[in-house]
């Protein structure tokens, strides 16, 4: 009896089939892809606007619910409530399967044909809202990018698009999410390329731009969206050495943030499942951090806005240090330093305790604090005066480039969200230095480091990537005729006459592979009629030069075929049970088909 899910799918396809047929007759492939990209951009843009609007509305309600003297205590308790609610939703509504961060999407795209679970259409939005709106110290960029990717992947699945187009639309959704959050369409495209797709085939460029632009229009129309503002006309030539020093500082901070985040992730993995100990300990730790350093509350973009507006002294407002006044510059710098260093700790604790959010926004906040701290210390020496606001945005770009390993995304994101296009040259210096130095110490980004430790090389070259997509089970050939060890030479000759293969596995009654026989091995013996009844197959067979397991990768199988110089290898289980053969010609034919699909959208 068909399930309700199957019936629901049937109704959807019954409705879509006439539309798909009409499209095939009247709409070209290129125009169709542009339509799909725009649709994904529209939906991802609406999702981004909904999340940001809901987060800010909830934060305003929570802020209005307490009076100023009690605010610092309320800010310490709210995140615990948000994390608890997130854990309840994850455990009872999502069956414990949330899949936080960009890492799972990168894996889905690189290794699972861009098949993103349907639950991510809503799970990231709900849990990110609960976490961040209650003050969890994490960003919403990763959840909305994941939601956009899920929209693209599942739209392609519903429309019966192939793997190649599904991968493109997954990237379109991720790009649209980032574009809508920041009103930065170019940065959205580059983020999808550098962090999700890890490449940009020429035919991808236009659909990605269309999707990002559509999402940006939606965001601009429905939500203010521009988080920061900077008006600058030029950069100062004699500050170039300081740009290089800031790049070094950004790299050191990036390495610290990557390693700290993954240390906490490894620590939390010792407590599998959604245990309440993690919620209580993590929530209490986060509450204490926010009590000591209130700027750690929420995403932290309000702090960046104060730095860009030249109101850095307001950072101490609401903290325990505000009693010492706004004029104590060293106290301000001390608070900025500890907030910068603790931002990654607060984000790690937020996620580790069960909340949902990403490192994208945290990198921007930490980078802004680093840039301000660096510039203020230089200015305090009295030797030279440098524009602090420039270094705030340069620090944002430098740390983002290092943590995410996405220098182009960092350059264009900062230029787009701050209006600081005049800072392109300084942005290039800072992001390049930060990225190169960070990559020397941390070859993988905060998103891909965990995948790499698990043995998933998402940066594999194109050939390896194509081979990894081939399913060894679909390449298994079971048409080879098995022979019992007791068969005679005469029986073998009779089988040769009717067989379409010249390789024969020798298999026991229990199904174990004993050896193989090829036509070349017995060519001379075939004409010895005197031994047709006396010579057994067991006397003629030889051990297989190599045996492949059913779960071995196609790349490994191809390597064995090359080393042994054979055209086919037997496939057996770990217990030696014969399953079939994998042929080199089948691998190459399937690989060629993948190459052809790779060149199509």
Image (cartoon, rainbow, N blue to C red):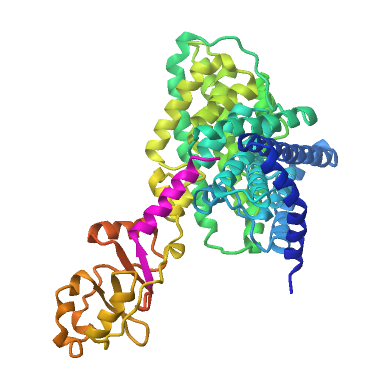
> Which residue is drawn at the image coordinates 57% and 18% (left, top)?
390
Residue 385 vs residue 483, the one in the foreground: 483
The spot of residue 516 in percent (x, y) is 26, 75
Q: Is residue 542 left or right of residue 284?
A: left
Quarter of the image that includes the N terminus:
bottom right
Quarter of the image that includes the C terminus:
top right
Q: Is residue 290 above or below residue 532?
A: above
Residue 24 vs residue 210, the one in the foreground: 24
The spot of residue 564 in percent (x, y) is 23, 61
Q: Which residues are magenta?
A: 580-601
> Which residue is drawn at the image coordinates 42% and 62% (left, top)?
475
* Residue 325 visible in rendering: no
Which quadrant of the structure image shows residue 322?
top right
Q: Is residue 582 magenta?
A: yes
* Residue 568 visible in rendering: yes
Chief secondary structure of the magenta span? helix
> Which residue is drawn at the image coordinates 43% and 23% (left, top)?
245
Q: Is residue 255 above or below residue 370?
A: below
Q: Is residue 341 magenta?
A: no
Q: Is residue 243 left or right of residue 359?
A: left
> Which residue is drawn at the image coordinates 24% and 58% (left, top)?
563
**Total label count?**
0
Q: Is residue 360 above or below residue 478?
A: above
The spot of residue 220 in percent (x, y) is 75, 27
Q: Is residue 517 left or right of residue 59?
A: left
């Amino acid at each position: 009896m068909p399930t309700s899910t199957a019936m629901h799918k049937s109704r959807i396809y019954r409705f879509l089939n006439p539309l798909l047929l009409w499209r095939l007759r009247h709409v070209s492939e290129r125009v169709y892809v542009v339509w799909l990209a725009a649709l994904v951009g529209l939906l991802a843009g609406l999702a981004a606007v909904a999340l940001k609007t809901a987060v800010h509305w909830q934060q305003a309600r929570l802020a209005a619910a307490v009076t100023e003297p009690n605010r610092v205590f309320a800010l310490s308790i709210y995140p615990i409530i948000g994390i608890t609610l997130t854990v309840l939703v994850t455990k009872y509504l999502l069956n414990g399967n949330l899949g936080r961060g960009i890492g799972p999407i990168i894996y889905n795209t690189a290794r699972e044909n861009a098949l993103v679970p349907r639950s991510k259409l809503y799970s990231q939005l709900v849990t990110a809202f609960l976490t961040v709106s209650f003050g969890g110290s994490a960003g919403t960029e990763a959840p909305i990018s994941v939601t956009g990717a899920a929209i693209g992947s599942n739209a392609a699945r519903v429309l019966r698009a192939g793997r190649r187009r599904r991968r493109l639309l997954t990237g379109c959704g991720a790009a649209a999410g980032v574009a809508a959050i920041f009103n930065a369409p170019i940065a959205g495209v580059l983020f999808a390329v550098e962090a999700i797709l890890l490449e940009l085939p020429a035919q991808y460029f236009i659909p990605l731009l269309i999707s990002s632009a559509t999402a940006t229009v939606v965001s601009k129309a429905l939500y203010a969206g521009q988080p920061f503002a900077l008006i600058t006309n030029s950069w100062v030539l004699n500050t170039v050495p300081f740009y290089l020093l800031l790049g070094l500082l950004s790299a050191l901070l990036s390495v610290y943030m990557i390693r700290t985040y993954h240390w906490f992730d490894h620590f939390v993995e010792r407590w599998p499942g959604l245990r309440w100990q993690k919620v209580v300990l993590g929530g209490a730790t986060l509450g204490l951090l926010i009590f000591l350093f209130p700027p750690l509350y929420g995403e932290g973009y309000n702090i960046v806005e104060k730095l860009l507006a030249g109101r850095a002294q307001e950072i101490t407002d609401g903290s325990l240090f505000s009693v010492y006044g706004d004029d104590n510059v060293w106290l301000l710098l001390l608070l900025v330093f500890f907030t910068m260093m603790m931002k990654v700790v607060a984000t790690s604790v937020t996620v580790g305790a069960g909340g949902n959010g990403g490192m994208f926004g945290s990198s921007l906040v930490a980078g802004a604090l680093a840039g301000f701290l660096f510039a203020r210390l230089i200015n305090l020496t009295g030797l030279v005066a440098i524009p602090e606001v420039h270094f705030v945005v340069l620090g944002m770009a430098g740390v983002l480039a290092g943590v995410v390993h996405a220098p182009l995304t960092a350059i264009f994101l900062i230029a787009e969200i701050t209006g600081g296009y005049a800072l392109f040259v300084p942005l290039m210096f800072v992001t390049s230095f930060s990225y190169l130095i960070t990559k020397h110490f941390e070859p993988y980004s905060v998103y891909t480091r965990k995948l790499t430790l698990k043995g998933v090389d998402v940066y594999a070259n194109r050939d390896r990537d194509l081979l990894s997509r081939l399913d060894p089970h679909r390449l298994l050939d079971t048409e080879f005729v098995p022979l019992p060890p007791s068969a005679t030479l005469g029986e073998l000759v009779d089988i040769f006459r009717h067989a379409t293969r010249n390789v024969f596995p020798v298999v026991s009654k229990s199904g174990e592979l004993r050896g193989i026989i090829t036509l070349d091995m017995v060519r001379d013996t075939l004409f010895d009629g005197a031994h047709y009844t006396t010579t057994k197959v067991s006397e003629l067979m030889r051990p297989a030069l190599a045996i492949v397991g059913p779960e071995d990768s196609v790349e490994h199988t191809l390597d064995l075929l090359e080393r042994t110089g054979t055209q086919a290898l037997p496939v057996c289980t770990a217990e030696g049970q014969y399953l079939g053969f994998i042929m080199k010609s089948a691998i190459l034919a399937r690989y060629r088909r993948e190459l052809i699909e790779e060149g199509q959208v």
